[in-house]
Image (cartoon, grey):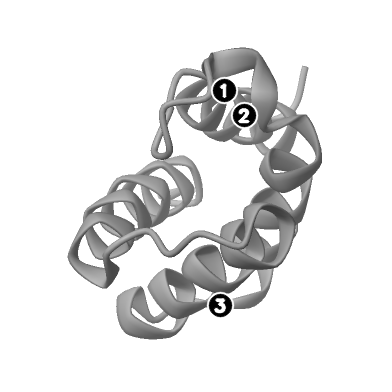
Amino acid sequence: MDKTQQMNIQIMENLLNWDPLGYGEDSYETEVVDVLQAVHVYDSVSILAQKIQDIYEFSFEELIPLSTCKKKAQELLFIKNSGSCEL
């Protein structure tokens, strides 16, 4: 398994264990895939946090606080960046 696959699995597991709206961890499969894609596109915590908020709001018509989304964005970008460092 290459580093990108490992990183994607870590990000997916992180997101699948996140229940930001209280619907149960199995309620967000579509959103997890959309956020995973966004992680690959954006390197800014602020922009990624806004995208995360938008993705979940679009699906559930509920707003996750931006501060919560920023914390998640930081975690996801940490996973992304720790997997891409090579000497």
Badge 2 is on which residue? 12
Badge 1 is on which residue? 16
Of labels 1 and 3, earlier in sequence is 1
Q: Residue at x 48, y 50 (%)?
A: 80
| C-alpha distance separating marks 2 and 1 | 6 Å
| C-alpha distance separating marks 3 and 2 | 16 Å
Residue type, numbered disc 3: Tyr
Residue 6 percent coordinates (x, y): 64, 24
Residue type, numbered disc 2: Met
Of labels 3 and 2, earlier in sequence is 2
Q: Residue at x 43, y 28 (%)?
A: 19
Helix, strand or loop for disc 1: helix
Disc 3 crowd, CA 10 A, few/some/many (<14, 14-19, 20+): some
Helix, strand or loop for disc 3: loop
Asked if residue 40 lies left or right of residue 85, the reply is right
Front residue of this view, candidates 4 and 67 = 67
- Nearer the observer, disc 2 or disc 1? 1
Badge 3 is on which residue? 42
